[in-house]
Amino acid sequence: MLQRPRRNRRSAAIRGMIRETRLSPSQLVQPLFLVPGKGVKTEVPSLPGTYRWSIELMLEEIDACQNLGINNFILFPAVPDELKDKVATYSYDPQNFYLQAARTIKERFPAICLISDVAMDPYSIDGHDGLVGEGQILNDPSLPILAKMAVAQAEAGFDVLGPSDMMDGRVGYLREALDAAGFTQTGIMSYTAKYASAFYGPFRAALDSAPREDADIPKDKKTYQMDPANAQEALREARLDTAEGADFLMVKPALNYLDIIALLKYESELPIAAYHVSGECAMLLAACGNGWLDYEQAMPETLLSIHRAGADVIITYFAKDYAQRVHDGRLKY
């Protein structure tokens, strides 16, 4: 045989020389769940190894991550029910513990990239990403609320805002509001193709942000999050978000939507982010915990597959674990 592909696999040195995909810790984003109070570090039961942190302990966690090469963090607030209302007023309150935490984090770690979450559900008693009225999610009346939230987050020091709400036109609306307030350098990582997925359970448990059980409001988020059956619709969303001023396009979830990641990577000139969501991570942890898979091999392979599909940026609960293994020399990239 003249062609023997195995010749290029015969040693670690040769395999490393021709490796097509390399994933650096600098391309990973570590999600962090913030709670008010002090001395709080509580594990998310359905996502072992992931915690809800009060700010002073979160600072220690960020420091530990940064020492391993993780410089990007996305921050989510677990808001007590007594601070919630129908119009998410607390989201832009100057005393909001989430905004205060962002200021503290950026003062302590000015060089990191801190990414926000822009949506009403953490602050809404209805648990929806937009304003609920007349038995539906009201698109246009939600935009001014999201804009106030976005400007408050930019003022607090967030480098990149993550509108996860999936309201039509929100990227352009936020971009105009940010620019008018003088935040022309604050980026937008749009949740461009956010699917109405079954894999968000542990996340919603961590934030207590699931839609409220009420006869007068929608039971799910299917009227604004995308249908898992659709791919071409993701292209439409990507073109709209790009035209409206997005700086990143995100696909969420990641593993069940590798084709969407590849599609947007091929079609767009913007960086593509993928959110390796809580349910996807929980499944792998459960399989490894039962001895069905080897975590040391399965976790890096999972992240590599998301990057190989076209994700320039990966948000994953395994970011610190991956970086730790690179730091220890157990992983090469």
Image (cartoon, rainbow, N blue to C red):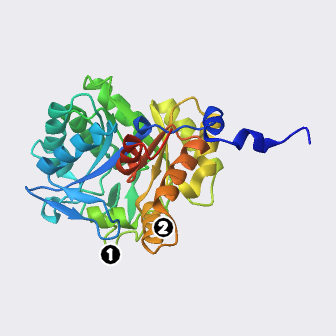
Residue 115 image-quadrant placement = top left
Task: Please state if 110 lies on the left or on the right of 319 as rendered.
Answer: left
Q: Residue at x 61, y 44 (%)?
A: 309
Tell me, for residue 213, which label it has, or none: 1
Work out which residue is located at the far front of the displayed protein and give it. 11
- Give the class, few, some or many, for how many residues have Cα within 10 Å of label 1's Cα (few <14, many ≥20): few
Q: Residue at x 39, y 67 (%)?
A: 201
Q: Is residue 321 visible?
A: yes
Work out which residue is located at the far right of the displayed protein and give it. 1
Residue 296: percent from left, percent from top? 47, 57
Q: Nearer the viewer, residue 280 or 64?
A: 64
- Give the class, few, some or many, for how many residues have Cα within 10 Å of label 2's Cα (few <14, many ≥20): few
Residue 299: percent from left, percent from top? 48, 55
Task: Please state if 140 lies on the left or on the right of 79 as rendered.
Answer: right
Q: Residue at x 43, y 57 (%)?
A: 277
Amino acid at dot 2 = Ala
Does the CB distance between marks 1 and 2 fall below 8 Å?
no
Mark 2 sits on what residue? 198
Tell me the element at label 1. Answer: loop
Screen quadrant of the N terminus: top right
Amino acid at dot 1 = Glu
Vertical side of 302 occupied by 74: above or below:
above
Q: Nearer the viewer, residue 90 or 273?
A: 273
Mark 1 vs 2, N-terminal side: 2
Task: Please state if 44 lies on the left or on the right of 25 as rendered.
Answer: left
Q: Is residue 134 visible?
A: no
Vertical side of 98 occupied by 212: above or below:
below
Task: Please state if 331 lies on the left or on the right of 320 as rendered.
Answer: right
Label 1 – label 2 distance at C-alpha: 17 Å
Tell me the element at label 2. Answer: loop
